[in-house]
Amino acid sequence: MLQLSEIFYSIQGEGTWTGTPAVFVRLAGCNLSCDFCDTDYSLKSIASVEGVVRVVGETGGSCPMVILTGGEPLAQVETLALIEALRHDGRRVHIESNGTIYATLPEDVWLCVSPKERVDPRMAARANEAKLIVDERVPEEHLPHFEHLQSILLQPEGNKQRNVEIALAYAHAHPERFRLSLQTHKFIGVR
């Protein structure tokens, strides 16, 4: 059984896939306690893998993209079974992870790692995308883990003006590798 916070249909508001329609499966719980976290990932319901796949279809129809997020989606043992079931249902699975919990993922699963306190080097090496949260500074200590990525996203915490300025200055100073990633869904008023 999976512990869930919510399932909803919206658009991806951050990162490489910004603007793409997606069904979000927000799994409950996280193995970190970040002060700046803006997400309610508290437990709201429990469902089987099959039940989640059914709700994804009911919620998003034929939308091919499903984003597993949290909290930390890989903190639940049944997440890997959910990934397989969603792929079997014809969905393209994306995972938004803090990168602390190692899991072997199919190659066609898109992995966005957004490190906070620490990161498992194996998950960083598997990442398709890295999103660094800029909260009064760019967390450069995580950069060595993402040498394989051509670009790294800088996301200002809370879209706060000071954090935007820091991220922009860093991107301007390193234009070959860094991109600004704003939480566009918050600007347009959707989840």
Image: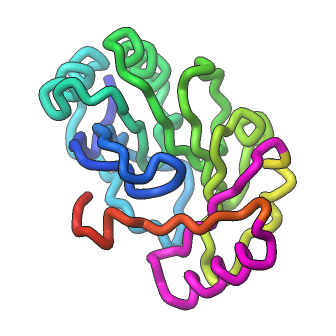
Residue depicted at 36% across the width and 21% down the height: 91
The quarter of the rendered structure image containing the C terminus is bottom left
Determine the residue located farthest toward the bottom in the rendered image.
162
The quarter holding residue 78 reads: top left
Determine the residue located farthest toward the front in the rendered image.
176
The quarter holding residue 20 reads: top left
Question: Does 123 appear above or below 34?
Answer: above
Q: Is residue 96 left or right of residue 119?
A: left
Determine the residue located farthest toward the top in the rendered image.
88
71 or 132: nearer the viewer: 132
Q: Is residue 161 magenta?
A: yes
Residue depicted at 79% across the width and 41% down the height: 121
Q: Is residue 44 magenta?
A: no
Q: What sort of colour scheme is used for the picture?
A: rainbow
Q: Position of residue 7 (x, y in %)?
A: 24, 40
Question: Does 62 appear above or below 124?
Answer: above
Q: Position of residue 79 (x, y in %)?
A: 45, 26
Residues in magenta, as a range: 148-175
Q: Is residue 62 left or right of residue 33?
A: left
Residue depicted at 32% across the width and 59% down the height: 40
Question: Does 50 appear above or below 41?
Answer: above
Q: Is residue 156 left or right of residue 101?
A: left
The quarter of the rendered structure image containing the N terminus is top left
Determine the residue located farthest toward the left in the rendered image.
58
Q: How many marks?
A: 0
Q: Is residue 48 left or right of residue 165?
A: left
Residue depicted at 59% across the width and 49% down the height: 98
119 or 126: nearer the viewer: 126
